[in-house]
Image: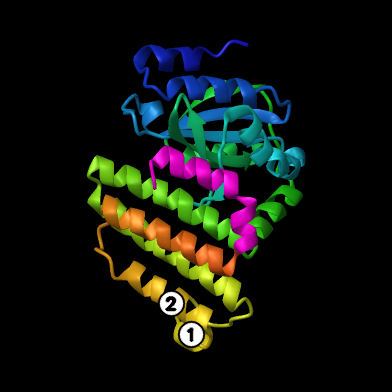
């Protein structure tokens, strides 16, 4: 398979993550359902550093889109070394597809793999909305007609309530993102992701202890959660989380992750058990006690 654009990227910029980019490209293009691969972000611009993520847009045949999403976690885990199921990205803009963030154990380090998976008929819209560089096109002359089933699946997936396991994964992935921001000195982004981290912890507590709540966001937490000893203990952890410095530090992040693990063990032990090996790998790569 000839990928001249990928070779051009390699000549211009060869960060440590490029081997992961090449490996992921080879794995994704094995699937006949994949119609296009595009690279976004610093790897596409040639400005990547050792902490940059590998950021892909994956075009998939509309008729096979739902099936592709259903095996995506298994593909990333088996073929690319993903340590966690993908976090459904709530930050990426809506462009007709679904965004996922994976943490990959690669060459002794933890790497971030961002995937925006879109129906083939939506790829032109993605290209209009975000700066990206095509590295693979299966059939340049093909015209893909929109499939209402794919669009419906995207909408239903985005509207689906998240489970305790989903929210624990979110907290871990966002914790990793914060770690990168601290290392880079990106205080403003660390601040915004710190709020996202605390919100994931709140949502984990609320999903486990008040799953039928009709109140939005942070409303009525004491009234709904604080009526039982376990609920009050969870709210104490949450209060400690939101009382740490607004701009996270390595110390406050480590303490915050410990509190999330403590809360998860109390309210969602099955989720913790399901992710036990992933949590151990996460701790190992982040050098957490």
| Residue furthest front as drawn | 289
What secondary structure is found at the residue carrying circle 1?
loop
Which numbered dot is residue 235?
2
Mark 2 neighbour class, 10 Å CA radius: few under 14, some 14 to 19, many 20 or more: some
- The picture places residue 192, in percent across and down from the top left corner, at 33, 58
Gap between marks 1 and 2, in whole Å?
Answer: 7 Å
Q: Is residue 242 left or right of residue 185?
A: right
Residue 62 versus residue 29 in the image, above or below: below
**Chosen colour scheme:** rainbow
* Residue ID at (58%, 37%): 123
Residue 97 can be seen, yes or no: no
Q: Residue at x 40, y 71 (%)?
A: 237
Q: Going 54% across and 39% down the picture, which residue do you hit?
A: 115
Q: Nearer the viewer, residue 26 or 289?
A: 289
Residue 204, position as x, y percentages in the image: 53, 67
Residue 13 seen anywhere in this rendered image of the structure? yes
Determine whether the residue tagged by mark 2 lies in a helix, strand or loop: helix
The quadrant where residue 219 appears? bottom left
Q: Residue at x 58, y 10 (%)?
A: 2
Question: In x, y percent, where is residue 95?
Answer: 54, 48
Q: What numbered label is drawn on residue 21?
A: none
Q: Nearer the viewer, residue 150 or 1?
A: 1
Residue 276 in the magenta stretch? The answer is yes
Q: Are marks 1 and 2 in contact (CB under 8 Å)?
A: yes
Is 247 on the left-hand or right-hand side of 283?
left
Between residues 47 and 86, which one lies in front from this camera angle?
Answer: 86
- Disc number at residue 226? 1
Please say if 114 is above or below 247.
above
In the picture, the quarter occupied by the N terminus is top right
Numbered range of the magenta stretch: 269-289
In the image shown, does 235 or 246 lie closer to the viewer? 235
Task: Give the answer, above or below, for where 63 lies relative to 92.
Answer: above
């Amino acid at each position: 398979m000839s990928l001249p654009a990928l070779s051009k990227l390699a000549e211009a910029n060869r960060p440590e993550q490029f081997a992961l980019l090449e490996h992921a490209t080879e794995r994704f293009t094995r699937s006949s359902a994949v119609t296009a691969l595009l690279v976004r972000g610093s790897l596409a611009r040639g400005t990547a550093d050792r902490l940059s993520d590998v950021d892909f847009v994956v075009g998939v045949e509309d008729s096979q889109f739902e099936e592709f999403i259903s095996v995506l976690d298994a593909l990333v885990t088996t073929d690319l070394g993903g340590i966690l199921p993908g976090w459904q990205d709530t930050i990426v803009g809506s462009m007709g597809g679904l965004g996922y963030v994976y943490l990959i154990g690669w060459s002794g380090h933890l790497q971030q793999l961002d995937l925006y998976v879109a129906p083939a008929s939506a790829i032109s819209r993605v290209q209009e909305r975000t700066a990206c560089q095509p590295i693979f096109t299966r059939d340049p002359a093909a015209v893909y007609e929109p499939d209402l089933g794919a669009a419906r699946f995207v909408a239903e997936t985005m509207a689906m309530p998240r489970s305790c396991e989903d929210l624990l994964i979110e907290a871990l992935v966002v914790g990793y993102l914060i770690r990168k921001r601290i290392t880079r000195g990106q205080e403003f982004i660390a601040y915004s992701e710190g709020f996202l981290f605390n919100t994931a912890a709140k949502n984990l507590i609320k999903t486990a202890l008040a799953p039928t709540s009709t109140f939005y966001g942070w409303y009525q937490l004491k009234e709904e959660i604080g009526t039982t000893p376990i609920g009050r203990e969870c709210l104490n952890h949450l209060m400690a989380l939101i009382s740490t410095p607004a701009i996270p530090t390595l110390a406050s992040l480590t303490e915050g992750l410990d509190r999330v693990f403590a809360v998860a063990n109390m309210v969602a032990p099955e989720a913790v058990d399901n992710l036990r090996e992933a949590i151990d790998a996460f701790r190992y790569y982040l050098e957490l006690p």
